[in-house]
Amino acid sequence: MTLAEKISSQAISMLSKKTDNGTLNNTLRLLSKWRSVLIQNTLLEKEGTRVIQGPLKGLNFIERSAEGCHIAKLLGCYEQPLQPHISAAISKGYTTVLNIGCAEGYYAAGLARAMPEAKSLAFDTDPKAQVACKELAAKNGVSDRVEVGGLFSPSNFADYDQASTLVFCDIEGAELELLDPEIAPALRSMDIIVESHECLRAGITDTLITRFSATHDIQLITDNGSRQLESAPVWFKKLSHLDQLLATWEWRSGPTPWLVMHSKALTGSH
């Protein structure tokens, strides 16, 4: 069965059971993912696996992501509202990056390339993601500075208390349990960039802000979904407007703002 046949079968099955708004929305989402994969195949054929723009430009990525969207990562517009803060982090000179929820290693390997003096410590509970992250690090020649592990617990932060450490966290809502300075005091002197999965756990963003407001200067980064390409390939400009939108769509089901939190202990403010 071809991909088109498989998707058609799923869509027909979904619509044959119900035709309410929820079913129509889910069917549209399914078809949109299918279309974005087709555009992704075109991108791979035309451009290969190098990230085209953004702070991780030049990263030699992979053909399929461990989870979620892929083409936006290759285009270099993935999580674009966060990119100025990633660029600022790259220039800050951290000695250690804790990438918790590393998936296939887009940030773990990408930041290691961009920060040649830093050690990138990547953690994911999915064994397949761990393997993919190691392979991506090797592909980009940074295996000597990328270490990959499994579960990261609050007690583990103490191991990096003496380093200039950036915590880069994306763990699908489990940040509520992990990022707590009462349980992990070492967090008070670490800079943190965390994706807050408001769509999965309503109120989590405000909870994190409350926890860290005394020890960190906090910026809330929201996302309206719009993306810009600095120098879009010629073939991309010839796509329909809908295909251009789908190419940069990140498959998010709801709000996932970011919190960029700079330790006051590091800035010298009180």
Image (cartoon, grey):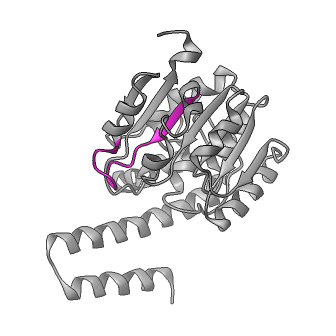
Q: Quick check: is 201 in the magenta stretch?
A: yes
Q: x, y percentage for residue 269?
A: 49, 9
Please give the range of residues in magenta.
190-204
Nearer-the-camera pick, 90 or 202: 202
Image-quadrant location for residue 118 = top right
Q: Is residue 57 visible?
A: no
Going by the image, does 161 lie left or right of 135?
left
Judging depth in this view, the residue of 131 and 153 nearest the camera is 153
- Percent x, y of residue 171: 50, 52
Q: Main secondary structure of the magenta part?
A: loop
Residue 108 at x, y percent in the picture: 67, 45
Please report the residue visible at 46 percent of the width from the left and 30 percent of the height from the top. Answer: 260
Relative placement, left or right, of 123 versus 249 is right
Give the quarter of the image for residue 81. top left
**Rendered position, 96 above or below 28:** above
- Residue at figure coordinates x 59%, y 60% from the top left: 65
- Which of the 4 image quadrants contains residue 29? bottom left
Q: Is residue 72 above or below residue 181?
A: below
